[in-house]
Every structure is written in structure tokens, then in C-alpha cells.
Amino acid sequence: MVFSTLAKTGKVFLITPKLAVKFRKLLYKAAREHDYEKTQGIMKEIFKKVISEDLRPLIPKIKVPTLVLWGEEDKMTPIKDAHFIKSALPGSKLVTYKRQGHKLPYEKPEQLALEIEKWYRQLS
């Protein structure tokens, strides 16, 4: 959310397209995320909608067992969001990973698979 706000603010202060591009690149570099920067066309529009939509009011409507896996150093979706989800979903399980960020599924696929398998067995 912070980076989204900064990106919007940058448009106001950096009138020239050349400066705006430089500002955006610095912003993405600081966030260590380049997904938006790499998207094009309709995917860029979908990306904007996904990151700007607030789905928090819908979380309590989830009535199925839920496993929440989170990187503790996620800068795109901070750990406080994981704790909010955990508190909004009674009976959910939160597992966090130290020194991991937003790309947890790509960086720790085996560990996540084991955690999901363990959780699934507990449901049976």
C-alpha cells in the first residue's frame, strides 16, 4: 500500500514522463519488486486493480479451514496483513518464514509443499 501511494504521488510531482519513469524505477528497486514494471497492456490494468482493491471486508466470510503462509520480510504485503487475516479467520493457521519476502512460493517451494501436506493431513 505504501508503494502504491508513493507511485501515485510521483505522478503529481514528476510532471515530465522522463522523470516519472526514473522515479518509478527507483521505487520498484527500493521495493525489490519489478512485476508491475514488467507487465504490459491489459495485464498492467489487471495488476493495478488487484493491488488497489480492498478485500478485507470479505475475509470473515471465508468459512473453510485456511492455511496462511507468509514471508516475514514481505515488503509488498507486510506481515501485519498476515496477522489481520489470522485474527479475522477463527481456526486458521498462520506459518511465517524468517528472512523471506513476497516471492516465498518461488524461493521455498519444497518447504511450502511440506507445510501444506502436513496441514492437509491434520484436516483428515
Image: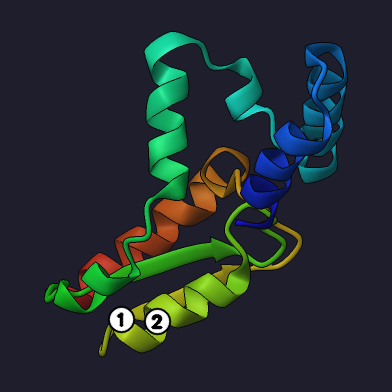
Task: Give the spatial CA distance, label 1 vs label 2.
Answer: 6 Å
**In-image side of 36 versus 30 (left or right):** left
Q: Position of residue 27 (x, y in %)?
A: 80, 37
Q: Which is more toward the observer, 111 or 72?
A: 72
Is label 1 or label 2 in front?
A: 2
Q: Which quadrant of the figure has residue 75?
A: bottom right
Q: Position of residue 56 (x, y in %)?
A: 34, 70
**In-image side of 54 versus 11 (left or right):** left
What residue sits right under mark 2 in the picture? 86
**Lower sequence index among marks 1 and 2:** 2
Label 1 crowding class (10 Å Cα cut-off): few <14, some 14-19, many 20+?
Answer: some
Q: Which mark is residue 92?
A: 1
The image shows a total of numbered marks equal to 2
Name which residue lies at 59% across and 27% down: 36
**In-image side of 29 versus 122 (left or right):** right
**In-image side of 16 versus 70 (left or right):** right
Q: Disc 1 vs disc 2: Cβ atoms closer than 8 Å?
A: yes
Q: Which mark is residue 8?
A: none
Quadrant including the C terminus: bottom left
**Secondary element type, mark 2:** helix
Under mark 2, the amino acid is Lys
Up the image or down, 18 lies above or below 113; here it is above
Q: Which is more toward the observer, 95 or 85?
A: 85
Label 2 crowding class (10 Å Cα cut-off): few <14, some 14-19, many 20+?
Answer: some
Q: Position of residue 64 (x, y in %)?
A: 13, 72
Q: Which quadrant of the figure has residue 7?
A: top right
Name which residue lies at 41% across and 24% down: 45
Under mark 1, the amino acid is Ser
Q: Position of residue 122 (x, y in %)?
A: 23, 77
Name which residue lies at 50% across and 81% down: 83
State how the image is colored.
rainbow
**Secondary element type, mark 1:** loop
